[in-house]
């Protein structure tokens, strides 16, 4: 059976780094008065990282 989801520890670490960096960057950018598009771009990177991390955890739970 093949699974169509993110796999591996590197993907998990990438997702964690993207989520922390993106969300923290968006909060910092909003506090510093950065442009709206830059803040939304950073927030999008953070949300993508969260989805990638959750996908890794769910895929790992299905395999075990």
Image (cartoon, helix red, strand yellow):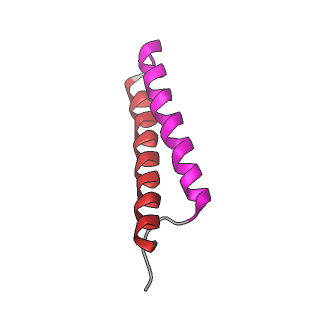
In this image, 54 relative to 20: left or right?
A: left
Above or below, 8 relative to 26: below
Question: What secondary structure is the stretch in magenta mostly built from?
Answer: helix
Above or below, 57 relative to 3: above
| Image point (53%, 45%), residue name | 16
**Position of residue 20 measured from the top left corner of the image (x, y, whole percent):** 51, 36
**Position of residue 62 measured from the top left corner of the image (x, y, whole percent):** 40, 70
| Image point (42%, 65%), residue name | 61
Question: Residue 15 in magenta?
Answer: yes
Q: Which residues are magenta?
A: 8-34
Quadrant where the N terminus is found in the figure: bottom left
| Image point (53%, 43%), residue name | 18
Above or below, 18 relative to 31: below
**Which picture quadrant has residue 40?**
top left
Q: Residue furthest right?
A: 10
| Image point (48%, 20%), residue name | 28
């Amino acid at each position: 059976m093949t699974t169509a989801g993110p796999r591996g520890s590197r993907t998990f670490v990438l997702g964690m780094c993207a989520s922390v960096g993106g969300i923290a960057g968006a909060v910092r950018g909003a506090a510093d008065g950065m442009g709206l598009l830059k803040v939304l771009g950073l927030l999008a990177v953070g949300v993508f990282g969260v989805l990638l991390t959750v996908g890794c955890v769910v895929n790992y739970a299905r395999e075990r």
